[in-house]
Amino acid sequence: MTQALVSLLLAAIIGQFHAWVYILTHSGVSYSRAFVQSLVLLTIIVCMAMMVIGNNMIVAFGLIGALAVIRFRNVLKDTRDTAFIFFSLVSGIATGTGRFRIAILGAVLFAVVLFYLHITDFGSRLQSDAFLRFSLNGKPEGRDSVNSLLHQYCFSATLVSHRLSEMGSSELAYRLSLRDPARAFEMVERLRLAEGISNISFILQEEQNEI
């Protein structure tokens, strides 16, 4: 009885611990309070399941049959959420089988790695992306001055489309990698003041994990 109580309490603590890690490191747009709570509950449920099963294969097959009846319709939009679900399951297995040291060490290491990935923004290729579209009237040399201005504010400015109109103007579209997103609107204002440039459209898009 004491062993079971300790296992369940440890499962609840570890479940809440990595639920808090999820809250603090989540940066997407699909945050769900229900998902966070399920991380805690799953850890406890799996812990209980492992204690119920023990070495009894008949109970194990019965539990599998019961779970097969349940239909899971929730689709995870972020692949990172899958890692949290899997960690909840493994933590429940570890606490339910009495492997407390593995459960605690795993939880600490899991949190350390997650905070490292979050703080360093590991895996990001660009600091920020932007899309710029405008009309250019006048001589073709005006494009050179535009490129010079863009490279003052951008690591790279890639021309993605160039369309000529019957009136002789050009419609240009660029994909930008900004040096400092905070100065993006300063760049746009300088473009507005430049001669021959009109119809400016600017979109700043911070990198996200899901859509």
Image (cartoon, rainbow, N blue to C red):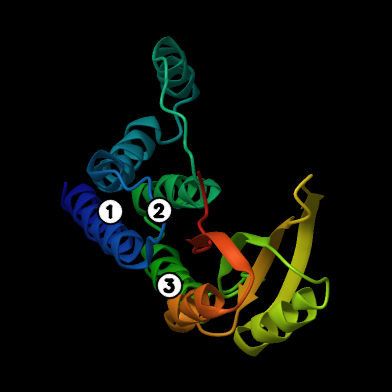
Which numbered marker is on residue 91? 2
Q: Identity of the amino acid at label 3?
A: Leu
Residue displayed at 40% across by 69% down: 101
Label 2 packing within 10 angstroms: few (<14), some (14-19), many (20+): many
Q: CA distance from mark 1 to mark 3?
A: 13 Å
Foreground residue, 191 or 35? 191
Q: Can you give x and y, in whole percent of width and height, for residue 55 in the image? A: 46, 34
Look at mark 3 in the image and give the residue it sits on.
105
Q: CA distance from mark 1 to mark 2?
A: 7 Å
Q: Quadrant of residue 112?
A: bottom left
Which numbered marker is on residue 146? none
Is the residue 102 above or below the residue 145 in the image?
Answer: above
Q: Identity of the amino acid at label 1?
A: Ala
Q: Can you give x and y, in whole percent of width and height, for residue 100 in the image? A: 36, 63
Q: Is residue 11 left or right of residue 197?
A: left
Residue displayed at 22% across by 60% down: 13
Work out whether residue 130 can be spotted.
no
- Badge 3 element: helix
Work out whether residue 4 can be spotted.
yes
Q: Can you give x and y, in whole percent of width and height, for residue 99 in the image? A: 41, 59
Say which label, 3 or 2, has the lower sequence index.
2
Residue displayed at 33% across by 61% down: 18
Foreground residue, 100 or 33? 33
Q: Are marks 1 and 3 in contact (CB under 8 Å)?
A: no
